[in-house]
Image (spheres, helix red, strand yellow):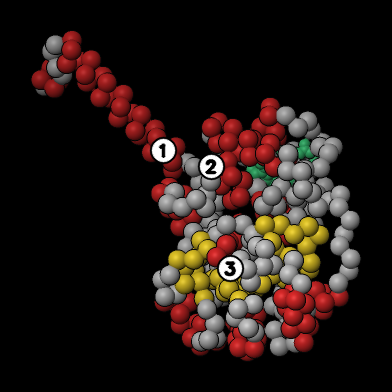
Amino acid sequence: MTRLLLPRSPRGQVFLLLLGGLGAALCGFALSQMAFFPQTPNAPALVTRVYDSAPTHEVTTRGEFLYQTQCAKCHGIEGHADAEGGEHLQPPPRDFATRPWRFSVTRASIRHVIAQGIPKTAMSASKHLTNAELDDLTDHVLRLSRNAQTTTNRPAPPADDRWTTAGFTRRGTPRPAPALEITSLAGEASSMSSFRGKIAILNFWGTNCVHCLQSMPALSQLARELDPEKVVIVNVCADTDDVAQIDKVTRRFAPQLTFYVDDAGLARFRYDANLLPTVWIMGSDGQLLGRSTTAPDWSGAAIRELLAKLSAHPG
Ligand code: HEC
């Protein structure tokens, strides 16, 4: 039987060998793709899908993607250690732009730290990464380490009570709003950059977030008072992409507001929206100016004064 299956001529055998090799390579590739997202249990399955088909410019490199999904929750999106997740850690996560580091800022050293972790710190080993993923991640950290703009060694901006009383923390250094593609409930594709030119309230909320839902009626009222040419309210649902479910909830709580879906599930990583609500205020120049992780008092005078001030002196 076996003899019948194997080609007799040497040429035929070589062909069979090549075919086998190709099959093995394909299997290997498929397996490496599967192993690529092993430690992002919370990332919606959609993230994987979007990355695989890479339909947009949103996900630029694999290193950046791995960083955003696995490291940014402590080290911050741009490596400035300003993420919520790192705030209470001792020692704190490194701001990659500052010096000195505990270890040297070299490719070999960074790669070693990522693979092995740092004992007795929150920096754990990433044993699941392939060599190629480790290389890409190392490259991305090196890029962030050259990121000259750093919040740590800049003087804090003068205290501005308007931000605090409105329930926001003003950023020391504004940073460009990360790219994010969103889709309106009506199915229209949009992106954060399309709101440039206006002050934007970026409200990352969730269908399971009670505070978010409770604050919606007051937010609707605010939306009615604002001049839509000057201030827009962008509500991005960050806990589900089920349009029917979002539609149902929003019809009940805030039928007048405009809602978007975060198709790729990247808001949590790019806008640090792990806690809901997370509200960012974006200046008309596309810079993120301040953030709130509590549901701000949308019915109060403070938020109105803050928005009026920002509209009068953008930036
Ligand atoms: C749970 C929080 C956490 C996560 C997630 C995390 N880190 Fe860290 N990382 C830390 C802490 C804390 C330190 C600082 C330890 C110290 O000061 O010794 C650190 C240190 C480092 C350092 C060494 C800097 C130096 O001073 O030598 C590098 C490089 C690094 N992290 C890269 C990464 C990368 C890449 C990822 C993603 C794969 C990651 N970290 C994920 C918390 C984290």
Task: Sort mark 3 into few (<14), some (14-19) or many (20+) by Cα contacts within 10 Å.
Answer: many
Q: Residue at x 81, y 59 (%)?
A: 172
Question: Mark on residue 31?
Answer: 1
- Please report contact status of discs 2 and 3: CB closer than 8 Å, yes or no: no
Q: Residue 103, image x and y in percent?
A: 79, 33
Q: Are marks 1 and 3 in contact (CB under 8 Å)?
A: no
Q: Which mark is residue 16?
A: none
Q: Is the CB of the residue bearing disc 3 within 8 angstroms of ligand 1?
A: no
Mark identifier at residue 62: 2
Q: Mark 1 against mark 2, which lies toward the viewer?
A: 2
Mark number displayed over residue 195 = 3
Q: Quadrant of the N terminus?
A: top left
Which amino acid type is shown beneath numbered disc 1?
Answer: Leu
Q: Which of label 1 and label 3 is nearer to you?
A: 3
Q: Earlier in the sequence, mark 2 or mark 3?
A: 2
The amino acid type found where label 3 is placed reads Phe
Identify the image quadrant of the C terminus: bottom right
SS class, disc 3: helix
Local secondary structure at mark 2: helix
As drawn, 257 above or below 29: below
The first of marks 1 and 3 along the sequence is 1
Residue at 65% from the left image edge and 80% from the top image edge: 211
Q: Position of residue 252 (x, y in %)?
A: 51, 88
Q: Position of residue 192 (x, y in %)?
A: 57, 64
Residue drawn 45% across the image and 82% down it: 248
Mark 2 or 3, closer to the camera: 3
Q: CA distance from mark 1 to mark 2?
A: 17 Å
Q: Does the closest atom of ligand 1 sit within 8 Å of the Cβ of label 1?
A: no
Query: Residue 285 falls in which quadrant of the image?
Result: bottom right
Q: Amino acid at mark 2?
A: Arg
